[in-house]
Image (tube, grey):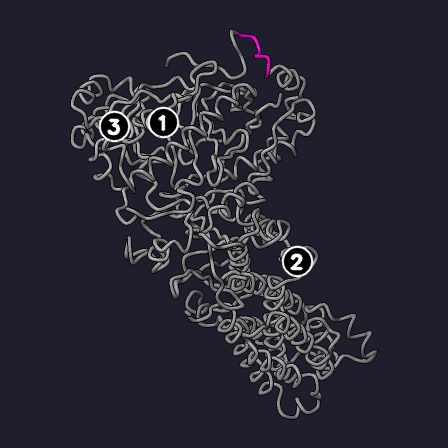
Amino acid sequence: MPTFFDEMYADGAVRDHYRAYESWLSAQAPQAIAAKRAEADLIFRRVGITFAVYGNEAGTERVIPFDIVPRIITAQEWTGMQAGLAQRVQALNMFIHDIYHEQNIMKASIVPPEQIFRNAQYRPEMQGITVASDIYAHIAGIDLVRAGEGEFYVLEDNLRVPSGVSYMLEDRKMMMRLFPELFARYPVAPVEHYPDMLLDNLRSVAPLGVSDPTVVIMTPGMYNSAYFEHAFLAQQMGVELVEGQDLFVNDNAVYMRTTRGPKRVDVIYRRIDDDYLDPLAFRADSTLGVPGLLSVYRAGRVTLANAIGTGVADDKSIYPFVPEMIRFYLSEEPILHNVPTWQCRRKEDLAHVLAHLPELVVKEVHGAGGYGMLVGPASSKAEIENFRRRIVAHPDCYIAQPTLALSACPTFVEAGIAPRHIDLRPFVLSGKTISMVPGGLTRVALKAGSLVVNSSQGGGTKDTWILEN
Amino acid sequence: MLSRTADHLFWMARYTERAENTARMLDLNVQTAMLPQTPAAARRGWCSTLGICELQHAYNAKYPEVTARDVLDFMVRDTTHASSIASCLRAARENARAVRGTLTNEVWETLNITWLEMQNKLDRVFDGDPGQFFEWVKHRSHLSRGVIFGTMLQDEALYFTRLGTFLERADNTARILDVKFHDAGRNTSEGPFRDEHQHDYYYWAAILRSVSAFEIYRKVYRDAITAERVVDLLMLRPDMPRSLLACLSEVVRNLRAATADTGRDTLRFAGKLHAELKFAHIDDILQQGLHAYLTGFLECVYELGNRVSRDFLVPAAA
């Protein structure tokens, strides 16, 4: 493993912005801290802040481990990140609009057409369709990692149905409940107004001519892994949480079934994949969707957030082109770095990847959630050889990146406090304007040395503090 | 509000109430089992408990004979059928989870904690006095009802929740009365008590206690405990919270609040059922035959539940 950046310490000394925290922590009795951690676990369980597990133990609910050591970021660093995030998301929205309209970026030979048209996430149904404010990714989750001082890389863009914002909010609530005294010592920027911002954002992209739009959240149901978040956001925004069966299409409009009869719906924040939205247009076997929804959508009489077909822009095969998009659409230099990426579909890249597998991270182009990836330095010979065969068989399906030295943050583990690798997912809202709350969700890989932070792979979360000046 | 949301709220309340009534009924049987009685009567007590919940077939398929321990186990912990206390509390929590965004945090947490605590308690139900477990179930039910009433906005969400509670309670009270009145006649004819009145006293006193009505009976009638008055109390007293009449009053009140353009026929149906109880006299009912009367009543409650579903909860596709 390469050496990594420690968020709290530099050459054995505590970094300035962690100093007050460190002195507070070292004054705490271990039993008191242990009691607080137990309390946090109990509260998460009681409140039912859980995610459903797929696979082996289907149907069971688990609490995502919460770590009480906050991840602290200075105002100055955040200001840079914020500008970089807004820039990136703006370019991505312009890219999606371009792809489904003039396709200038292909005409300019910046993105090869086959990368778009052979992408399973490209939706021909969206070609030429006008969406409100030309916004496609209304809610974007951009995964960032830090490699050094002020040096942030975008690991991936999530433009379909990014989740985790409820943990960001619950983690803050938990920290304030457990350690109110810390918030007297630190000027932590608040995040609790996220649901308000989200609701404003969703209302701002209602179909033309709707003055008082009805917004709903659409969930696949209570057995979805992120169901807690769907219910949480619906409650916090005061909107209905609907399933496909609650909606129907009539006379070119979408309605929900209520105890007082049908009610018109204008904006659907859908937490369900494109494929399942409308059995008449996409997967016919979907029981989660609404028959006829696409035709109402294409007529501009309902807004879907995010739009259909955003996956064409957050695919790992499109990721390497994002810096060029920023230059192309905005005529600006990208503020946030991209991780250097080898695309196995290219002969020369493939040769490099196959020759350096033990050093690289290889990802499936369409994978998500930490499934189907190879972390070279952490894998056995057999695992690497097994993966090599998969890459050779389908080079188009893989990209590779150097194993980044993700920064680490002190974290409670069984043996005490030890550094664990972290990332950060800020949530960027796009509507009439681009907005975000300071920070985002910090995910932490709880296994020593592990770089995989996904909750489905045993990752935990931390409260993220952006300090105000 | 969303029809599906109303449906989940309705069933959340019904399952909570059903768990409580099952606990009350099982507790009653544990209590009466301590009275001197013939083995046949004891066995009949447990059989009729199964009968009240329409579980004889499911039970017989699993156990060769009816014993107290097996019936308790079947009705408390067995999650292979939907009527055990464990199944009911789980279903209540699942329904709450499906609409947790509609509930206040306190309501959701109360139901979630009930479910979490239950998992620890189920292993130890029979270690000591199972009555303690039944007490716990009752308390959790009281608590969730109180938290619902004390924290929820008084809108449709509350109306459909309360509707579920009282429709279920009306059903459960009617079933207990029906079976226990029937058993009482048979037990006295063969019982070990020399004195018929003495037996009646203990039998009906236990039933009154099971519905928290022993002291109420004393206060209302100031007289000896007789089957007729117990039936009167649990059916026709408007001020007795578990009586059929009181339940129907609440059903009509909440239904009226929830009814707009839809559901007028259902409200009329409920109103007729309510009026019938309100102006009934216990002598007439007993003369007509309690069993026949209660059978008719249960059919009406069942029909009412179906109508509520059809009008509000699971409306046909538009």
Question: What residue is shown at x 38% (from left), y 41% (from top)?
Answer: A160
Q: What segment is highlighted magenta in the picture?
A: A12-17
Question: What residue is shown at x 34% (from left), y 55% (from top)?
Answer: A294
Q: Nearer the viewer, residue B206 or A376?
A: A376
Check whether the beta carbons of the residues at disc 3 and disc 1 lie within 8 A of each other.
no
Question: What residue is shown at x 20% (from left), y 32% (from top)?
Answer: A396
**Residue B136, position as x, y percentages in the image:** 65, 55
Task: Identify the secondary structure beneath mark 2.
Answer: loop
Residue type beneath disc 2:
Leu
The Cα atoms of the two marked residues, 1 and 2, are separated by 49 Å
**Residue at image mark 1:** A326
**Residue at image mark 2:** B153
Asked if marks 3 and 1 fall on the same chain, the answer is yes
Q: Nearer the viewer, residue B47 or A421?
A: A421
Image-quadrant location for residue A24: top right
The Cα atoms of the two marked residues, 3 and 1, are separated by 11 Å
The crowd level at tag 3 (other Cα within 10 Å; few <14, some 14-19, many 20+) is: few
Q: Quadrant of the N terminus of chain A?
A: top left
Residue type beneath disc 3:
Ile
Asked if marks 1 and 2 fall on the same chain, the answer is no
Q: Nearer the viewer, residue A196 or B306?
A: A196
**Residue at image mark 3:** A110
Q: Nearer the viewer, mark 1 or mark 2?
A: 1
